[in-house]
Amino acid sequence: MSMSRKVPPGLYAQLETLPEYKIGEIISGTVYVHPRLPTVQCIAKSNLGMDLNERFGFRRGRWRIVFEVEVHLGPNVVVPTISGWTAERWPKGHDAFTTVRPDWLCEVLMPSTRGLVRDQKLTIYAEHGAPFCWLLDPLEKTLEVFVLHDGAYQIGPTFQGDMPVTAPPFAAQAFELGLLWEP
């Protein structure tokens, strides 16, 4: 489902003035500014993205998995930590943002964004029909999987520590969750 409302230009102008070391989002009419991920979260993000790209990504012709793409979903501007599109739905063009909702999202949580992601971003992703969303918490060493069902996310499997992960949409090949954490 796609909302017809567009991003308010005045709010978007605030995002354009942010320094490169900040991430800005517009969620439900409010501008949120976050720092880039700290090292522990960056390591988990990089390890997950590289692993999924190796198994399912561009060279395999199935998924396009990228970091921190600006996605406009109706009046909201979100920057998921990792986004994935099936090859058929990959947004064409070279714009600074896309309006094509991802087929899979992963938010790497940090204490300052945990509430925003859980309370608001998950709702936005569900409203716009993103089939799968993962919440990765390197401090707690957990991965929560959410699957869209009848317009709302249902909690799927949750993985902890170094458990093997088989989770949609990448359930075809398991990976060790412990490989994502900083050694």
Image (spheres, rainbow, N blue to C red):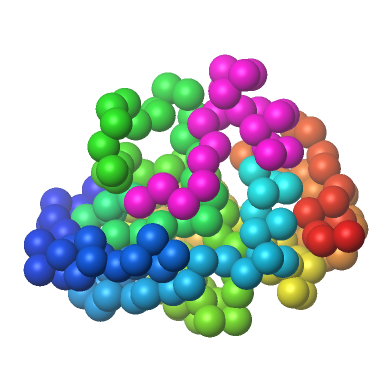
Left or right relative to 150: residue 40: right
Question: Which quarter of the image is occupied by the C terminus?
Answer: bottom right
Give the quarter of the image for residue 96: top left
Between 95 and 134, the residue placed more toward the observer is: 95
Residue closest to the eye, 58 or 19: 19
What residue sits 41% from the left and 48% below the top? 69
Q: Is residue 110 above or below residue 52?
A: below
State left or right for residue 14 relative to residue 77. Answer: left
The image quadrant of residue 17 is bottom left
Residue visible at 18% across and 63% down in the picture: 12
Residue 144, visible in the rendered structure? no
Q: Where is residue 33 in the image (x, y as percent from the top left)?
A: 37, 74
What residue is shown at x 51% (from left), y 60% (from top)? 153
For the record, the magenta segment spans 50-70
Q: Which of 129 and 181 is in front in this view?
A: 181
* In magenta stretch: residue 114: no
Residue at x-position 80% and y-position 49% = 165
Residue 34 position (above or below residue 41):
below
User: Is 128 located above or below residue 96 in the figure?
Assistant: below
Residue 54 at x, y = what percent?
71, 29
Residue 53 among those drawn in magenta? yes
How far across and down, in percent of the image, does residue 26 sit? Answer: 28, 68
> How many tags in the picture?
0
Res 91 seen here: yes
Q: In which quarter of the image is residue 150?
A: bottom left
Image location (x, y in percent) of residue 131: 49, 46
Apparent side of residue 93 relative to residue 133 in the rendered image (left or right): left
